Amino acid sequence: MTRTDAAGAASETYGKAYAKGPAAGKAYANGSTEATGQPVVVSDHGLPGWLDPVAEVARSVRPEQLSAFLPPKSGDGRQSAVLVLFGEGPQGPELLLMERAGSLRSHAGQISFPGGALDPEDGDPETTGPLRAALREAEEETGLDPSGVQVFGVLPRLYIPVSGFVVTPVLGWWREPSPFGAVDQGETAHVFTVPVAQLTDPATRATSVHPRGHRGPAFLLEHGLLWGFTAGVVDKVLHYAGWERPWDRSREVPLDWHA
C-alpha cells in the first residue's frame, strides 16, 4: 500500500566529498534555500541506521555505475535536480514519488521524483545550485516543508537524452514530515509514498519495454508503472545499498501497464 496526497489524487563526484559523522555537515555561506532562508547543509549525521547504506552509495558510487547515459562532455544539457526523499511511514521506510500531469511537454504522465530545472536564483550548478533546486521544486510540486528535509548526499550527475536534462539526484531524509499533495494540477497529478519493502518485493519488479525496443528496470505500483530515469535511479540505489532482492528480469511489461 502507498500513502497518497489528500487530493487522492557538485560535480559528478559530489557525494564523495562528505565523510560520515558530525564533521560531514557542510554549510555554504554563498547563499540559502529560497524556501527556508537557511544555508544549504549536507550532512549524514543523525540518520536512522537503515539509511546508512544509502549514504554510503552517495559517497562511493561512480556515474557509470548508475547509468549508461552520462552528461555530454561538451557541457550541453539543461541543468536540473530531483529530490530522492526517504521517510519513515506506517509500513517502515518509504520513498516520496509523484505522477506528472499528462499535459506537460516533457515526461507527461510519468511517475517521478519531485524536481526540475535549475533557476538562476538557485545559484551555481557546480556547487549548491542543485541542492536548492531540488528542495525548491519539491516544495512547489508537493507542498512539503523543505525545512524538515535533511540533505545527506548527492549522487553523480546523469543525463536524460530524450529531454536533454542533466540531472543531479539529491538524497534527503524526511526528518520532520509535513503534509504533502499536488500543489498545481497542471504540473502534478498525484503525490504519494511507496514503502521501500514494496520496491524491493520481487513481485513488484519487471522489465519495461519501450515501443522502440529499449528495455529497463520497472516497478509495478498502484499508481501505475514506474519506469525510465526514475526507475533506473531507484533500481541502482536498491542494488548498491544491498537492498535488492532477486527478481525475474524476463518478466516484461509495456509502458501502458496499469495495476
Image (cartoon, helix red, strand yellow):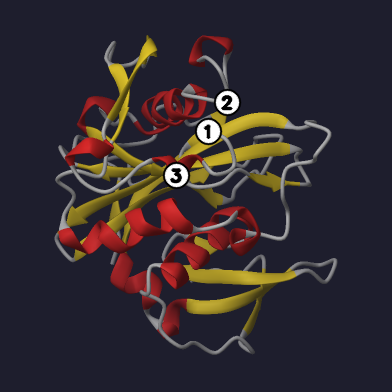
Query: Who is closer to the viewer here, 193 or 59?
Result: 59
Mark 3 or 1 closer to N-term?
A: 1
Which kind of residue does numbered mark 3 sit on? Gly
- Label 1, label 2: how many angstroms apart (C-alpha)? 5 Å
Q: CA gap, disc 3 to disc 1?
A: 8 Å
Counting residues from the start of the chain, the first of labels 1 and 2 encountered is 1
Looking at the picture, how far across and down is residue 207, in whole percent?
62, 77
Query: Residue under circle 2?
Result: 126
Residue 183 higher or lower than 88, as above or below: above
Q: CA distance from mark 2 to mark 3?
A: 13 Å
The type of residue carrying mark 1 is Ala
Look at 50% across and 78% down and name the residue there.
205
Residue 90: which quarter of the image?
A: bottom left
Q: Quadrant of residue 183?
A: top left
Residue 209 pos. (x, y %): 72, 73
The one of 14 and 106 positioned closer to us in this rendering: 14
Residue occupied by mark 3: 15
Instruction: Identify the amino acid type marked 2.
Output: Glu
Give the residue number, with chain letter if any, for mark 1.
Answer: 10
At a point 84% along the width and 33% down the height, the residue shown is: 74
SS category of the residue bearing label 3: helix
